[in-house]
Image (spheres, grey):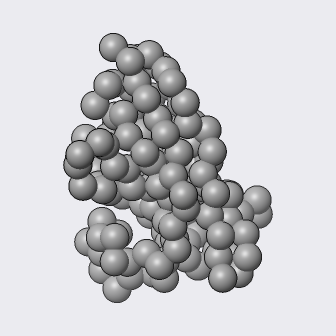
């Protein structure tokens, strides 16, 4: 089993920065791909950013490109999401997810690629 625990969420103002962390425990594996998703109230869960097992390939949703940066430290078994220039539209519960390496990069964006999920951390951006 794999356990994922997010941290770092909170209440910030528009324009501020925040860094989320996702700690991995259990049957950890650096080969697993990992991603961040988010779900705003009343909306579906959306892909935010994904990273390959070795950290060399990264993928971003259109709304966060240029503002968010995903990274991972396989020694510490932790993934990060650096969020800059936050706006109220970034308000959501942020989830980290892990899964086997997909056969195509497009699959990073799909929830079905991931079989392990964290419980989520709330990010609220005030205007």
Res. 58 visible in picture = no
Q: Nearer the viewer, residue 31 or 48?
A: 48
Image point 43% across, 45% down: which residue? 93
| Left or right relative to 65: residue 55 | right
* 47, above or below 109, in the image: above
Quadrant in which the N terminus is drawn = bottom right
Count of labels in the image: 0
Q: Nearer the viewer, residue 126 or 33?
A: 126
On the image, the x and y values in percent for residue 6 come to: 60, 51
* 66, above or below 118, in the image: above
Image point 76% across, 59% down: which residue? 76
Question: Dividing the picture into quarters, in which one does residue 68 lie?
Answer: top left
| Left or right relative to 52: residue 47 | left
Image point 55% across, 36% down: which residue? 9
| Left or right relative to 18: residue 89 | left
Q: Nearer the viewer, residue 55 or 78?
A: 78
Image point 73% across, 76% down: which residue? 26
Question: Dividing the picture into quarters, in which one does residue 53 lie?
Answer: bottom right
Quadrant in which the C terminus is drawn = top left
* 104, above or below 63, in the image: below
Q: Nearer the viewer, residue 121 or 105?
A: 121
Which residue is situated farthest in the right direction here? Answer: 75
Res. 75 visible in picture = yes
On the image, the x and y values in percent for residue 106 come to: 26, 72
On the image, the x and y values in percent for residue 79 come to: 60, 55
On the image, the x and y values in percent for residue 23 come to: 68, 58
* 21, above or below 106, in the image: above
């Amino acid at each position: 089993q794999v356990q994922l625990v997010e941290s770092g969420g909170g209440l910030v103002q528009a324009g501020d920065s925040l860094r989320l962390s996702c700690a991995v425990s259990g049957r950890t594996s650096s080969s697993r791909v990992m991603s961040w998703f988010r779900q705003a109230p009343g909306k579906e869960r959306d892909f935010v950013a994904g990273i390959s097992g070795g950290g060399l390939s990264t993928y971003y949703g259109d709304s966060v490109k240029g503002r968010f940066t995903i990274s991972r430290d396989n020694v510490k078994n932790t993934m990060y999401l650096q969020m800059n220039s936050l706006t109220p539209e970034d308000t959501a519960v942020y989830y980290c997810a892990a899964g086997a390496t997909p056969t195509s990069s497009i699959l990073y964006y799909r929830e079905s690629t991931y079989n392990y999920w964290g419980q989520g951390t709330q990010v609220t951006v005030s205007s």
